[in-house]
């Protein structure tokens, strides 16, 4: 069965600092990987996705993520965080031809001035 | 705007009651997913419908049921409500493809008093 681990429940960073949110997945074959963001009171919005090819993927709002098969990881990064990035971030894993997507528990990001 | 519409936005009801949550998927999307998000459980997959047929079940209680209608909108019925059913309920939709990108609605916040 596929699973996702987001080891950090809460992270606090200063505005302008770099950010890395960790995600580890468990799946037997090549996974499809996603990062979603949820602003307070809102639904989840897709930030970026990895299906195949280049292991460094670019997303919206200046985010990127790198797929590392050897580490079963798909960490989300941003070089300089803005106050508007404060939200909850969810990593998710799916599989080709199989419609279920499994979400991690989420990481809440707080941005301080 | 994801294109997924959920109504109502907020619902307040009493224990023992029954409610219906409604979801209209993005135009052309055949799949609808329902999720429950609570503080202690995170984002839990409930059920998936594809073109009117149930495809997968997750952690859905027997008191809960769902259906997808010929026009592809979906309803989630929650009955014999308990205090613990208070949560955000999200609907997501995706196109019929092997790559399962889900687009989320803004959610329905259910408060059971």
Image: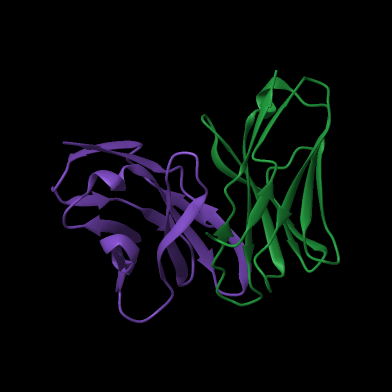
Chain colours: A purple, B green
Furthest residue toward right: B70
Side (left or right) of B71 relative to A104 = right
* Viewport quadrant of the N terminus of chain A: bottom right
- Determine the image quadrant of residue B16: top right
Coordinates of residue A100 in the picture (x, y in percent): 61, 61
- Between B52 and B9, which is closer to the camera in this rendering? B9
Q: Which residue is located at x 66 percent, y 75 percent? A: B96
Residue that extends furthest to the left in the rendered view of this protein: A17
User: Quick check: A18 above or below A95?
Assistant: above
Q: Is residue B56 visible?
A: yes
Q: Residue A59 is drawn in which quadrant?
A: bottom left
Residue at (56% x, 61% y) in the render: B103
Residue B14 location (% of width, % of height): 77, 20
Q: Position of residue A42 (x, y in %)?
A: 50, 45
Q: Residue at x 79, y 50 (%)?
A: B75
Q: Residue furthest bottom?
A: A53
- Relative image position of residue A91 (x, y in whole percent): 42, 54
Instruction: Using the image, determine if residue A93 lies above or below residue A11.
Output: below
Q: Is B44 positioned to the left or the right of B20 in the image?
A: left
Quadrant showing the C terminus of chain A: top left
Number of numbered discs on residues: 0
Residue A63 appears in the rendering:
no
Location of residue B33 by image quarter: bottom right
Identify the residue at image location x=77%, y=55%: B74
């Amino acid at each position: 069965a596929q699973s996702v681990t987001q080891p950090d429940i809460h992270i606090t960073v200063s505005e302008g600092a770099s950010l890395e949110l960790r995600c580890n997945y468990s799946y037997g074959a090549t996974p499809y990987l996603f990062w979603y963001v949820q602003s307070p009171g809102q639904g989840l919005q897709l930030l970026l996705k990895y299906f195949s090819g280049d292991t460094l993927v670019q997303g919206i709002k200046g985010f990127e993520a790198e797929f590392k098969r050897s580490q079963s990881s798909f960490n989300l990064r941003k070089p300089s965080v803005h106050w508007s990035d404060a939200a909850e971030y969810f990593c998710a894993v799916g599989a080709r031809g199989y419609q279920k997507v499994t979400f991690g528990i989420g990481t809440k990001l707080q941005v301080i001035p | 705007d994801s294109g997924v519409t959920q109504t109502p936005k907020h619902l307040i009801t009493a224990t023992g009651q029954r409610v219906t949550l409604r979801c209209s998927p993005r135009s052309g999307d055949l799949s609808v997913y329902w999720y429950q998000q609570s503080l202690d459980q995170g984002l839990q997959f409930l059920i998936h419908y594809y073109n009117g047929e149930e495809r997968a079940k997750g952690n859905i209680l027997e008191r809960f049921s769902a259906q997808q209608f010929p026009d592809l909108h979906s309803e989630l019925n929650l009955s014999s409500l308990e205090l613990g059913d208070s949560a955000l309920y999200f609907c997501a939709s995706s196109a019929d493809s092997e790559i399962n990108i889900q687009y989320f609605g803004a959610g329905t916040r259910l408060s059971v008093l």
